[in-house]
Image (cartoon, rainbow, N blue to C red):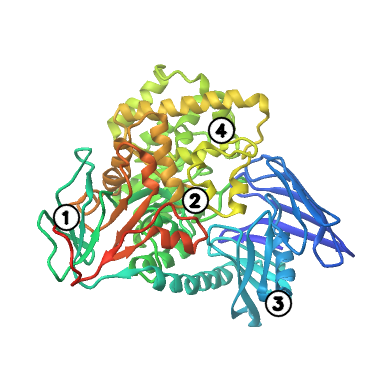
């Protein structure tokens, strides 16, 4: 089978079966990274594995060594990160770092299971949901679509099946398919978009709450990013998608009233570095994220998704898109456009402007000589310029050539730790930070020169600190501290995946990586104190990791007020939308997030969402989380419809 994106093949799955023995070779190479896995499976008389061994390397190079065995009535599993055992029964084992052979296996077993459902090991339930038939290829062959639930955060895997044979596993962004369909990415991606939309429309109908008249939010502490304070005494009046009043008086009889009971009302949060999939919208809204900058994606899928979020057909944030631009190389990433000449690159900048994109994102393999003309054309057309720092270019040069923003703190720091000739288009761009950053002198002339340049140019950094924590400070079986506040709330397969090593680290390297992590935190604090604009983003699991980003900044040394300001007004200024977003004020968009507690003193309160308001609709985080198999972090507010007797306003 072939793993394909809009830019072509990035991986191959080869399955060789002989009797009850199955051998699997799974290889992916995208942007210099990808799993390289071999498996050997022995199937028992009931079609379930009695033995399964998995070995190789994970996406970023961490070693993989996992086994599953059934002896008598007991099933046992072990990996480099965990181990366990349970009654074998008829349960299906969900591997931690295996290949997509698992999907082929699940299809065959679940199709023969009562209710298309089986218990899962280590825990949980796997379920196939029968969707509709779709046609594939020029022959218009009809195949059956299913959604596989139980392996991720709500988001089911979409499967196209002929009989009991897996034809394709499809998403809008990447497709695993039998070889005869390897050239049909656009067709299969479109099928995935529509299947997702059908599932998500049903959730939107159930989880979106609309009110015809005014909504009064009473009893809240209102966070003001301008002053860094939260005050009481004002009720927030919302009508449709606008804040129409801040009033101390009591709600009129015709109003819908929400008593915040002393909770803190924030402007909607802004994620300044995401790569949105269809299902991410639910996680974002459940986390109070009402606006997102998408930092590079499959253009067709993103342009189809944006109006669905905006209209309320699907639940999700408003999106500001940066168009992805990459150079051609042996290490180039997929997505967006890959170019080979400066003229082609500039022409693609124009394409993004013509299609309503907010900015462009330049990636690792872009020839450095292309950056200046690309940035000049982007600025001429009113587009924001951001990116990774192309290989063999420094962050300083990228800023001088027109970058408005550096994506990721490691991309800023590579120039201080790379040696001549080293190529950061591989996982070296991560390992070199862990191995050498501890030695960086923050008072050194080179670092101070770049800080001064960023101050002069008002260059933004979207640091994505939380997404690097698993790379540098996760340990086998423990994961990283940034995941700790939410990890026990998500399904077991997600927990296992996060409690692993990401890079190929040995115990003797841990102290060095810990020291480099501390220096990374010091860099973040230094940039903040110097007045460099910092905006929080995820580049990881939607919503949940944005909260982790804010918590990471506080752990590094910023105050909760600093990070809340960055996630609200700071993000609005970054997007150039502070006239309508970022503060709670009359006339602004009613993008609001109510949390239980005081995040100005305890940033962890940011997770305890009780209400989200976006585009005139009300959403309850616990309802959304429950639908996505996430254990809620608290209970939603009570909504009193018009005409209900109420106590006097406090």
Q: Secondary structure at mark 3?
A: strand
Residue 630: % across, % down: 50, 56
- Earlier in the chain: of badge 1 and badge 4, it is 1
Using a 10 Å C-alpha cutoff, classify the residue at mark 2 as few (fewer than 14 neighbours), some (14 to 19) or many (20 or more): some
Q: Which residue is mark 4?
A: 473
From the viewer's perspective, tell me whether residue 374 is left or right of residue 364.
Answer: left
Q: Count numbered badges in the picture.
A: 4
Q: Nearer the viewer, residue 99 or 488?
A: 488
Query: Does 491 sit above or below residue 598?
Result: below
| Residue 569 seen in this snapshot | yes
Observer-side mark, 4 or 3, equals 4
Asked if the residues shown at circle 2 and circle 1 are in contact, with their CB atoms under 8 angstroms apart, the answer is: no
Q: Secondary structure at mark 4?
A: loop
Q: Which residue is mark 2?
A: 541
Q: Which residue is mark 1?
A: 235
Using a 10 Å C-alpha cutoff, classify the residue at mark 4 as few (fewer than 14 neighbours), some (14 to 19) or many (20 or more): many
Query: Which image quadrant is residue 355 in?
Result: bottom left
Query: Which image quadrant is residue 461 in?
Result: top left
Using a 10 Å C-alpha cutoff, classify the residue at mark 1 as few (fewer than 14 neighbours), some (14 to 19) or many (20 or more): many
- Earlier in the chain: of badge 2 and badge 4, it is 4
Q: Residue furthest right?
A: 19
- Earlier in the chain: of badge 4 and badge 3, it is 3
Quarter containing the N terminus: bottom right
- Image point (83%, 67%), residue name: 46
- Image point (61%, 48%), residue name: 497
- Earlier in the chain: of badge 3 and badge 2, it is 3
Query: Does 240 sit above or below residue 70?
Result: below
Q: Which residue is mark 3?
A: 162
């Amino acid at each position: 089978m072939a793993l394909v994106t809009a830019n072509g093949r990035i991986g191959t799955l080869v399955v060789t079966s002989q009797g009850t023995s199955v051998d699997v070779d799974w290889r992916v190479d995208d942007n210099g990274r990808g799993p390289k896995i071999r498996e050997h499976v022995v199937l028992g008389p009931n079609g379930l594995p009695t033995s399964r061994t998995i070995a190789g390397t994970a996406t970023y190079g961490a070693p993989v060594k996992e086994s599953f065995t059934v002896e008598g009535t007991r099933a046992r599993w072990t990996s480099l990160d965990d181990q366990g055992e349970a009654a074998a029964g008829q349960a299906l084992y969900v591997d931690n770092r295996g290949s997509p052979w698992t999907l082929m296996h699940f299809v065959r077993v679940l199709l023969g299971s009562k209710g298309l459902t089986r218990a899962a090991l280590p825990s949980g339930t796997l379920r196939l949901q029968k969707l509709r038939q779709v046609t594939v290829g020029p022959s218009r062959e009809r195949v059956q679509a299913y959604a596989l639930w139980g392996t991720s955060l709500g988001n089911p895997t979409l499967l196209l099946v002929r009989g009991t044979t897996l034809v394709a596993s499809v998403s809008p962004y990447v497709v695993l398919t039998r070889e005869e369909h390897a050239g049909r990415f656009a067709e299969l991606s479109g099928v995935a978009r529509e299947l997702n939309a059908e599932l998500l429309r049903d959730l939107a109908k159930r989880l979106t709450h609309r009110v015809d008249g005014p909504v009064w939010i009473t009893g809240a502490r209102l966070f003001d990013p301008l002053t860094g304070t939260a005050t009481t005494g004002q009720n927030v009046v919302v009508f449709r998608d606008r804040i129409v009043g801040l009033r101390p008086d009591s709600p009129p009889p015709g109003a819908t009233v929400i008593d915040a009971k002393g909770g803190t009302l924030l402007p909607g949060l802004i994620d300044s570095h995401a790569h949105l999939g269809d299902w991410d919208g639910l996680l974002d809204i459940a986390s109070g994220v009402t606006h997102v900058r998408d930092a590079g994606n499959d253009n067709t899928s993103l342009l189809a998704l944006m109006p669905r979020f905006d209209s309320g057909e699907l639940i999700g944030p408003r999106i500001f898109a940066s168009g992805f631009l990459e150079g051609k190389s042996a290490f180039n990433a997929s997505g967006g456009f890959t170019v080979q000449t400066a003229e082609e690159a500039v022409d693609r900048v124009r394409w993004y402007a013509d299609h309503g994109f907010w900015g462009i994102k330049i990636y690792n393999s872009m020839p450095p000589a292309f950056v200046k003309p690309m940035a000049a054309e982007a600025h001429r057309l009113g587009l924001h310029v951001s990116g990774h720092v192309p290989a063999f270019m420094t962050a300083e040069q990228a800023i001088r050539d027109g970058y408005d923003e550096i994506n990721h703190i490691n991309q800023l720091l590579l120039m201080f730790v790379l040696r001549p000739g080293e190529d950061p288009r591989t996982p070296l761009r991560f390992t070199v930070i862990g191995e050498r950053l501890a030695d960086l002198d923050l008072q050194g002339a080179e670092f101070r020169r770049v800080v001064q340049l960023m101050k002069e140019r008002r260059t933004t950094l979207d640091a994505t600190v939380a997404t690097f924590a698993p790379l540098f400070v996760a340990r086998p079986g423990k994961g990283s501290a940034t995941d700790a506040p939410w990890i026990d709330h998500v399904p077991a397969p997600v927990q296992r995946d996060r409690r692993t090593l990401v890079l190929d680290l040995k115990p003797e390297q841990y102290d060095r990586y810990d020291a480099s992590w501390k220096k990374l935190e010091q860099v973040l604090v230094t940039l903040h104190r110097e007045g460099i604009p910092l905006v929080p983003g995820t580049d990881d699991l939607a919503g949940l990791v944005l909260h982790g980003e804010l918590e990471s900044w506080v752990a590094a040394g910023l105050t909760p007020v600093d990070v809340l300001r960055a996630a609200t007004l700071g993000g609005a200024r970054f997007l150039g939308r502070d006239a309508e977003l970022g503060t709670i004020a009359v006339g602004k968009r009613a993008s609001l997030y109510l949390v239980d507690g005081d995040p100005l003193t305890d940033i962890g309160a940011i997770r305890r969402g009780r209400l989200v308001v976006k585009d005139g609709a009300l959403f309850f985080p616990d309802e959304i989380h429950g639908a996505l198999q996430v254990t809620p972090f608290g209970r939603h507010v009570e909504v009193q419809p018009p005409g209900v007797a109420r106590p006097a306003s406090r």
